[in-house]
Amino acid sequence: MKYLSLLFVILIVAACQNAPQHSGNQSDNKALPSTGNFGREVNFEQAVAADLVPGLFTTSDTVEATIHGHISASCKHSGCWMDLDLGNDRALHVTFKEEAFTIPLDAAGKNAIAEGIAIRELIPVETLKNYARDEGKSEEEIAAITEPLYAYEFIANGVLIEE
């Protein structure tokens, strides 16, 4: 899983380097207010806790949703992503549709509501075993991997960062 995490971090860093540094009319992300609505206006009345995202998938690997949670990490370079805490050392990675907006660089530690599309991807057992081998896990640990694992991400149309 560390290999998956490392790959994920590399992709995030690469995305941040190419992300626009604006939101709306502002050309400097550092000038953004630290709270408020970014991107499309968010209707928070139907928001569900981020840790409930896995239960939203019933017939498809994508679902429109509004979620809320604590921002455990965010892009410090350009504000192009954030992670919502799912508990148990897990996070839901949130990016912004078509890089149309960014969030404040100091968003980590705040609470947010995001509206958009949740996506799940099934990672096959063999791929998980390859990740474990790459991490240097023992043959016993690798043999214990017998079930595929779902990975989740969220593409937001809008984000409301609370005070």
Image (spheres, rainbow, N blue to C red):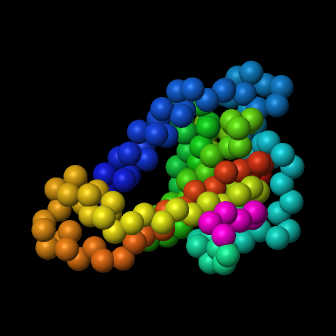
**In this view, 157 is above or below 47:** above
- Percent across and percent down for residue 129 are 26, 64
Q: Residue at x 20, y 69 (%)?
A: 142
User: In the rendered structure, does residue 26 fall within the stretch colored magenta?
Assistant: no
Is residue 160 visible in the rendered structure shown here?
Answer: yes
Q: Quadrant of the N terminus?
A: bottom left
**In this view, 88 is above or below 95:** below
**In this view, 3 is above or below 68:** above
Q: Residue furthest top?
A: 27
Is residue 70 visible in the rendered structure shown here?
Answer: no
- Percent across and percent down for residue 75 are 55, 39
Q: Judge from the rendering whether residue 26 lies leftward or rightward of residue 3; answer left or right.
A: right
- Percent across and percent down for residue 163 are 74, 53
Q: Residue at x 28, y 56 (%)?
A: 131
Res. 101 image quadrant = top right
Q: Residue at x 42, y 43 (%)?
A: 9
- Percent across and percent down for residue 87 are 49, 70
Which sits in the foreground, 140 or 156?
140
Give the residues drawn in magenta, as a range: 60-66
Q: Judge from the rendering whether residue 131 lies leftward or rightward of residue 76; answer left or right.
A: left
Provide the major secondary structure of the magenta segment.
Answer: strand
